[in-house]
Amino acid sequence: MGSGKGDNRKAQVHGSGAQWQQAGANAPRRGAIGDDGTELAGGGRGEDREDGHPRPLDAAQVGATDHEEAFLAALDSGAAQMLAAVMPAFHRARSWPESVRAAYEAMFAFAMEEPEYTRLGAVEMYTVGRAALRRRDGVMEGLEALLMPGYQLAPETPPIAAEAIGGAIYALIHDQVKRNGPEGLPELAPVATYMTLAPFVGAEEAYERAIEESDKW
């Protein structure tokens, strides 16, 4: 593993991991949504009349409300299906590092098979507003819970590592989908695995798990 093609592959995985870890570190933290984010005033209902009853929404408000509700429903449905694909793969693996790789394999395979949901969740949610971003944060928090075994292995790892990893992985997915579409996401599993494992198990073991063939486990 110390020369030729192996060295080139190792440099690619390490270099890509460092690039996206930096992207995650520089990404806005949760809740740091700009004031220009789109959000329906008054939660989507008309202002109250003097008699206390809400005013009817005009056509533009109704259209915007229906669009947002449909978008959020699609996000919720897709996220539930994605987690249903990821969790069994995570639990089937023999060890936590292998579980991480298996989870990314399943997540990216689902994303490729469901391109409409992937575009909604990775790129188009920014056109909807804060409610969609809160949905994204909820999914990321659920996935970050899968890092708890890593903290048991390496309790000295800073708590902020989980959020940094989540931000970096999301940046990786967002950039891939925006530039090239969801089709190439499965190719990112090795880099995502390395980025996730390195803070807990060290660079060398993270690299080994990142380049393993999935049929090994």
Image (cartoon, rainbow, N blue to C red):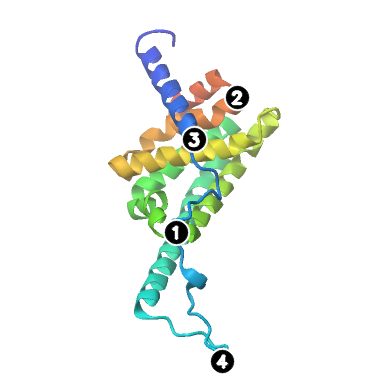
Circles 2 and 3 in contact, beta carbons < 8 Å:
no
Say left or right for 141 vs 184. Answer: right
Judging depth in this view, the residue of 167 and 191 nearest the camera is 167
Residue placed under numbered mark 4 in the picture: 51
Q: CA distance from mark 3 to mark 1?
A: 21 Å
Q: Earlier in the sequence, mark 2 or mark 3?
A: 3
Q: Residue furthest bottom?
A: 51
Q: CA distance from mark 1 to mark 4?
A: 31 Å
Residue 129's disc number: 1
Judging depth in this view, the residue of 3 and 23 nearest the camera is 23
- Number of residues whose C-alpha sits closer than 10 Å to that of mark 1, classed few (under 14), some (14–19) or many (20 or more): some
Residue 26's disc number: 3
Against 52, is 189 above or below?
Answer: above
Element under disc 4:
loop
Q: Earlier in the sequence, mark 3 or mark 4?
A: 3
What amino acid type is highlighted by mark number 1?
A: Gly
Q: Earlier in the sequence, mark 1 or mark 2?
A: 1
Against 79, is 214 above or below?
Answer: above
Residue 217 visible from this viewpoint:
no
Q: Residue at x 53, y 32 (%)?
A: 196
Q: Residue at x 53, y 18 (%)?
A: 204
